[in-house]
Image (cartoon, helix red, strand yellow):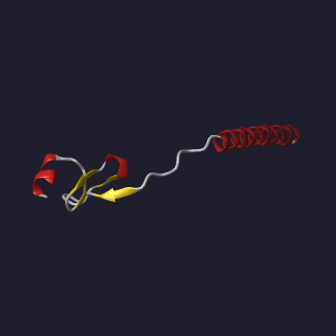
Amino acid sequence: MTKLLLWIGVIVAVLFALRLLNVAKAKRRTGAAGASQSPPAEKMVRCSGCGVYLPQKDATPGPTGPTCGEPACLREH
């Protein structure tokens, strides 16, 4: 019975140590990810021809509004 309790104690101690290591790794990962900031989100516009949303910088100006630049969308308007 004593051996069984000893093994249970060893297993619990190992699991606790592994848990502490995982917490430390997670803190390092979030700390490094928080330091590098992602670029700001771009404004999205809707193509007046087909209705697809695309970044404003990629949109082609058209007579009825921004278009995606596909030949079909440019011909329709």
- What is the x, y in percent for residue 70? 18, 47
As drawn, which residue projects farthest toward the left? 75
User: Image quadrant of residue 20?
Assistant: top right
Q: In the image shown, does 51 or 25 lie closer to the viewer? A: 51
Q: In this view, does 47 lie to the left or right of 20?
A: left
From the viewer's perspective, is residue 32 above or below residue 42? above
Q: How many marks?
A: 0
Quadrant into which the N terminus falls: top right
Residue depicted at x 13% and y 58% = 77
User: Image quadrant of residue 43?
Assistant: bottom left
Q: In this view, does 69 lie to the left or right of 58?
A: left
- What is the x, y in percent for residue 23? 74, 43
Residue depicted at x 53% and y 45% = 39
Residue depicted at x 86% and y 39% = 6
Residue depicted at x 75% and y 37% = 21
From the viewer's perspective, is residue 65 above or below residue 32? below
